[in-house]
Image (spheres, helix red, strand yellow):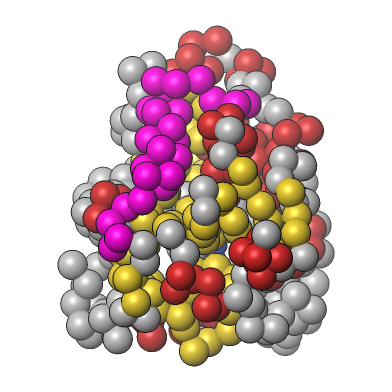
């Protein structure tokens, strides 16, 4: 599905919610525009989120809403964006947006950025004079790496581009500017005929995909890079870690060498857009049997059972929009402590080993 020139659209986006939340007001999609001299366009000064809302028997359900909004607040704090939007206010806005949009399922995109005060414009790098704007939009989005990918897996490469270093661009913040690095990784992969690229960190250790975290399975153990490998603290990553615990699968956060990718029994990506996508080859080296592995399949199955509301999640993971609307916004069950723990640190639920060599030679 990926054209050799990389110009094919990633997925079809047939339906867009025609309203957008802007600084506490509802505006039309067509009116959600910015001035071309806005700070964000020139200097990359935005932070954002990507959140999925799933179709369930109880109506649309937003996946780990509080954790996503907490990560947005964290990203803004790292970039000294002083604003008054609270996590609960943004969560309520997302719920209202899904309700207004009337879609059974969608992808929700909140963004905070430095815009332009047209009466008192400022054009320099210094972001402080520029006002902040917050928008939340939504659209229906299919499978990010293709429908088939969920079962068949994808062919990927190790990128020649490294992931950002922690003291240059913090990967912990989901900032728009970080995605220039992601675009280099993605374009190179597409133009070379791969679905995705895996970046190494500045030490040459495995970091993550351009828009996904990565997991290896080796000898029935699931292993994923530590946060210190310049990864985004993925909310799907955290979900996978918790699902492994529930299934009694050993899960380890560790340094991982590039070569470990080639000899892993199974590999998969995790992410809001990619969900759980198996990887069937890296740099044209077949991973395991070249098909989705059994542990990946089990984790994927539980993940989709949870997101479709058929199986109870280990925590308050689904926000049922119609039920919240029926009973008022105060009932949306924002889970403060869980959200903070997910976004700021390594999971409490994993072992951490010094590096993957240790894990492989035991
Ligand atoms: C660079 C990067 N890493 C990892 C992820 C996965 O994070 P999450 O599971 O929170 O979507 C994403 C997607 O947002 C991403 O863009």
Q: Is residue 304 magenta?
A: yes
Give residue 261's position: percent from left, percent from top. 49, 71
Give residue 37's position: percent from left, percent from top. 56, 80
Asked whether residue 357 appears in the rendered view, the answer is yes
Tell me which segment is drawn in magenta. Answer: 289-315
Residue at position x 31%, y 45% in the image: 140
Residue at position x 61%, y 43% in the image: 250
Q: Is residue 210 magenta?
A: no
Q: Nearer the viewer, residue 184 or 133?
A: 184
Q: Is residue 240 above or below residue 41?
A: above
Q: Nearer the viewer, residue 217 or 8?
A: 217
Judge left or right: residue 279 versus residue 175.
Answer: left
The image quarter containing residue 116 is bottom right
Q: Which quadrant: the C terminus?
A: bottom right
Residue at position x 33%, y 18% in the image: 57
Q: Nearer the viewer, residue 92 or 129?
A: 92
Q: Is residue 203 above or below residue 142?
A: below
Asked whether residue 40 appears in the rendered view, the answer is no
Residue at the farthest top position = 327
Residue at position x 53%, y 87% in the image: 161
Q: Which quadrant: the N terminus?
A: bottom left
Give residue 329's position: percent from left, percent from top. 61, 20
The image quarter containing residue 2 is bottom left
């Amino acid at each position: 599905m990926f054209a050799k020139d990389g110009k094919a659209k990633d997925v079809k986006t047939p339906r867009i919610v025609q309203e957008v939340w802007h600084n506490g007001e509802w505006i039309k999609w067509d009116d959600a525009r910015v001035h071309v001299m806005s700070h964000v366009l020139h200097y990359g000064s935005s932070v954002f989120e990507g959140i999925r809302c799933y179709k369930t028997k109880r109506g649309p359900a937003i996946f780990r809403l509080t954790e996503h909004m907490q990560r947005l607040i964290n990203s803004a704090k790292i970039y000294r964006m002083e604003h008054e939007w609270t996590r609960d206010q943004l969560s309520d806005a997302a719920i209202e947006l899904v309700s207004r949009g009337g879609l059974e399922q969608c992808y929700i995109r909140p963004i905070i950025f430095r815009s332009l005060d047209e009466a008192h414009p400022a054009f320099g790098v210094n972001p402080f004079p520029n006002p902040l704007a917050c928008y939340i939009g939504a659209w229906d989005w299919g499978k990010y790496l293709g429908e088939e990918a969920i079962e068949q897996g994808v062919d990927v490469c190790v990128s020649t581009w490294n992931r950002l270093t922690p003291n240059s661009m913090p990967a912990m913040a989901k900032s728009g500017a970080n995605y220039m690095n992601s675009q280099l990784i993605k374009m190179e992969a597409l133009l070379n005929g791969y679905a995705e690229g895996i970046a190494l960190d500045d030490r040459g250790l495995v970091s993550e995909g351009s828009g996904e975290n990565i997991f290896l399975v080796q000898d029935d153990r699931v292993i994923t890079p530590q946060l210190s490998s310049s990864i985004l603290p993925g909310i799907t990553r955290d979900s996978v870690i918790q699902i492994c615990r529930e299934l009694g699968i050993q899960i380890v956060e560790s340094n991982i060498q590039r070569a470990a990718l080639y000899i892993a029994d199974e590999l998969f990506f995790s992410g809001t857009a990619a969900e759980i996508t198996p990887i069937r080859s890296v740099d044209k080296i077949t991973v395991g049997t070249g098909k989705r592995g059994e542990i990946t399949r089990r984790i994927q199955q539980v993940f989709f059972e949870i997101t479709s509301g058929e199986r109870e999640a280990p925590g308050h993971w689904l926000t049922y929009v119609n039920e919240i609307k029926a009973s008022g916004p105060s009932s949306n069950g924002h889970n403060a402590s869980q959200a903070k723990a997910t976004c700021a640190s390594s999971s409490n639920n994993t072992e951490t080993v010094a590096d993957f060599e240790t894990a492989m030679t035991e």
